[in-house]
Image (spheres, rainbow, N blue to C red):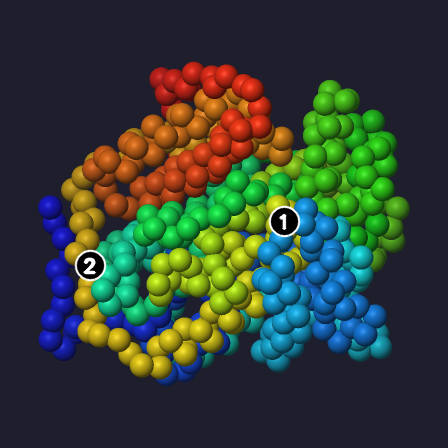
């Protein structure tokens, strides 16, 4: 067994930090910016710096800020209705009441929200909201916030950012945490007093997702393996209006804001249908719209659905949705004259690593922020545009708690002795593809109960292969292990619910395919 040699002498502290943040999206960057400048901080970016779910967020950020006609209580009520009243009331109070703090702060840092001719901020409407409270930068709000935060954090002398740095493992130690990092083909051990997981979602566990390539649930898996409590991982949001391309694993999102500006949902016959399912029509919450599309699909025997905004002024559409317009045009659709093919697609995770209102997990010194965390604010269905707000509010609160905690530094660093299996074989081909197929079949919008039972048994076997086998610890292994663990937890939760609430006989396990498709 080859392990990474520890450094002593002058270089002993080179890779020792007060805080290591895994993830370079909005939660990770804003947390780093709000940490005390006296702390030595390392941010790990799995791939290129702006490749994250944050950058893909189109619609905007919800919040009550300089809005006399709106109130945090109204925002809270809309959040509760969308979340099926399963929302944590304390965390949701924090979210809606502190929105004004972080919206004001990112404006101060340079985020350029769209304004009206009179100079007031333009606030748009999205599904589930009773008020116009969505601040946005055209239809690329996430990218605007991400790029602004990155520019500010890169100027901080106490923060180091490693690009293309894969977090292969993280272990709890007597002095804090040790990270095994694969960067530029070399393995490095980094140590920290506190750790922040801001690793995003789990979208790549599905065949089709709106999520970026980094969304494989790495932080959730490593927190789980350290004993952190994971909560409601089966609470997965399927966005109703992903562009129905189905030629690529990553599906382009048609923002909720398009419906907010008056677009209609139409079935295969070109007819509106939401009036048959919900009085809020196209502006019902996402889970309602996704379920309605599936019901309508069964009714019509077709999976052809469309979003139609052709009745609006073409110049307005181009100004309001320049990115969506451009991307659709490249795909052969002019949204000013053509209906847009859409279908539900995996989009967001409401559950995750359980945290309190300061983003503290059940593992001492470990924090989780953003989509990988479960603050409880989303209930069983996230209200549109609450995700960027959650990332800001709770990463700021985590930074305040860490800064206070680390006023008095702890004992000397005690690194973990990692084995990275350099000469071991690569993982078996096809495991990730098989996991995605199982999840897409068994647990999409309306779960397929027989497939759920069978898929869960097969996932247990795949997870055992990856957990007990000796494979090279590289990016492929890390992602396969994460996908298997995430699928295991999701289907385990769903299996338990299905077993308790239905008299169904579990089906035999899937046989492993003779020829797996290429990962």
- Quarter of the image containing the C terminus? top left
x, y (%) of residue 25? 49, 61
- Where 383 falls versus 517 (above or below)? below
Q: Quadrant of residue 363?
A: bottom left
SS at badge 1: loop
* Horizontal relation, residue 6 to residue 483: left or right: left
Q: Which of the two residues, 263 or 290, is positioned nearer the viewer here?
A: 290
Q: What residue sits 75% from the left and 51% below the top?
A: 128
Distance Cα–Cα, label 1 vs label 2: 39 Å
Q: Label 2 neighbourhood size at 10 Å, few (<14), some (14-19), many (20+)? A: many
* Horizontal relation, residue 515 to residue 67: left or right: left
What is the number of the mark on residue 437?
A: none
Q: Label 1 neighbourhood size at 10 Å, few (<14), some (14-19), many (20+)? A: some
x, y (%) of residue 125? 78, 57
x, y (%) of residue 14? 22, 73
Q: Which circle, 1 or 2, is nearer the viewer?
A: 1
Q: What residue sits 62% from the left and 46% below the top?
A: 380
x, y (%) of residue 402? 41, 73
Asked if disc 1 and disc 2 are in contact, CB closer than 8 Å, the reply is no
What is the number of the mark on residue 86?
A: 1
* Horizontal relation, residue 421 to residue 204: left or right: left
Q: Which of the two residues, 42 or 380, is positioned nearer the viewer here?
A: 380
- Where 136 falls versus 278 (above or below)? below
Choose the circle earlier in sequence order: 1 or 2.
1
Q: What residue sits 51% from the left and 54% below the top?
A: 374
- Where 373 falls versus 342 (above or below)? below
What is the number of the mark on residue 416?
A: 2
SS at badge 2: loop
């Amino acid at each position: 067994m080859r392990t990474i040699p520890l450094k002593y002498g002058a270089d002993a502290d080179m890779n020792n930090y007060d805080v290591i943040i895994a993830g370079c999206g909005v939660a990770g960057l804003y947390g780093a910016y709000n940490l005390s400048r006296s702390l030595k901080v390392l941010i790990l970016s799995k791939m290129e710096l702006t490749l994250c779910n944050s950058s893909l967020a189109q619609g905007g950020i919800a919040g009550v800020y300089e809005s006399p006609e709106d109130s945090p209580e109204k925002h809270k009520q809309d959040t509760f209705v969308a979340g099926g009243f399963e929302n944590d009331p304390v965390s949701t109070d924090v979210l809606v009441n502190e929105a004004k703090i972080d919206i004001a702060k990112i404006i101060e840092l340079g985020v350029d929200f769209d304004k009206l001719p009179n100079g007031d901020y333009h606030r748009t409407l999205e599904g589930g909201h009773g008020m116009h409270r969505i601040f946005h930068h055209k239809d690329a709000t996430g990218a605007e916030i991400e790029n602004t935060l990155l520019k500010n954090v890169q100027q901080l002398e106490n923060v180091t950012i490693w690009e293309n740095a894969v977090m292969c493992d993280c272990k709890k130690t007597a002095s804090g945490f040790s990270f095994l990092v694969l960067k530029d083909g070399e393995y490095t051990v980094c140590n920290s007093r506190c750790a922040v997981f801001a690793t995003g979602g789990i979208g790549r566990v599905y065949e089709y997702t709106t999520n970026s390539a980094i969304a494989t649930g790495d932080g959730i898996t490593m927190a789980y393996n350290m004993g952190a409590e994971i909560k409601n991982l089966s609470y997965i949001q399927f966005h109703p209006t992903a562009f129905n391309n189905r030629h690529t694993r990553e599906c382009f999102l048609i923002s909720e804001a398009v419906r907010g500006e008056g677009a209609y949902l139409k079935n295969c016959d070109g007819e509106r249908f939401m009036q048959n399912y919900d009085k809020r029509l196209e502006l019902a919450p996402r889970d309602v719209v996704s379920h309605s599309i599936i019901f309508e699909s069964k009714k019509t025997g077709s999976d052809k659905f469309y979003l139609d905004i052709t009745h609006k002024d073409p110049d307005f559409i181009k100004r309001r949705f320049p990115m969506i317009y451009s991307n659709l045009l490249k795909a052969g659709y002019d949204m000013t004259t053509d209906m847009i093919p859409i279908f539900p697609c995996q989009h967001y995770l409401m559950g995750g690593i359980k945290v309190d209102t300061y983003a503290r997990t059940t593992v001492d010194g470990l924090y989780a922020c953003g989509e990988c965390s479960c603050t409880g604010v989303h209930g069983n269905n996230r209200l549109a545009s609450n995700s960027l707000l959650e990332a800001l509010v709770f990463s700021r609160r985590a930074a305040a708690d860490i800064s206070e905690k680390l006023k008095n530094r702890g004992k000397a660093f005690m690194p973990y002795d990692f084995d990275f299996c350099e000469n071991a074989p690569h993982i078996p081909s096809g495991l990730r593809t098989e996991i995605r197929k199982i999840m897409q079949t068994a647990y999409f919008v309306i779960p397929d109960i027989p497939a759920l039972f069978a898929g869960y048994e097969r996932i247990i076997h795949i997870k055992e292969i990856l957990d007990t086998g000796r494979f090279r610890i590289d990016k492929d292994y890390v992602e396969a292990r994460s996908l298997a663990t995430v699928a295991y937890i999701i289907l385990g939760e769903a299996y338990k619910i299905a077993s308790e609430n239905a008299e169904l006989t579990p089906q035999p396990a899937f046989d492993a395919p003779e020829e797996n498709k290429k990962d």
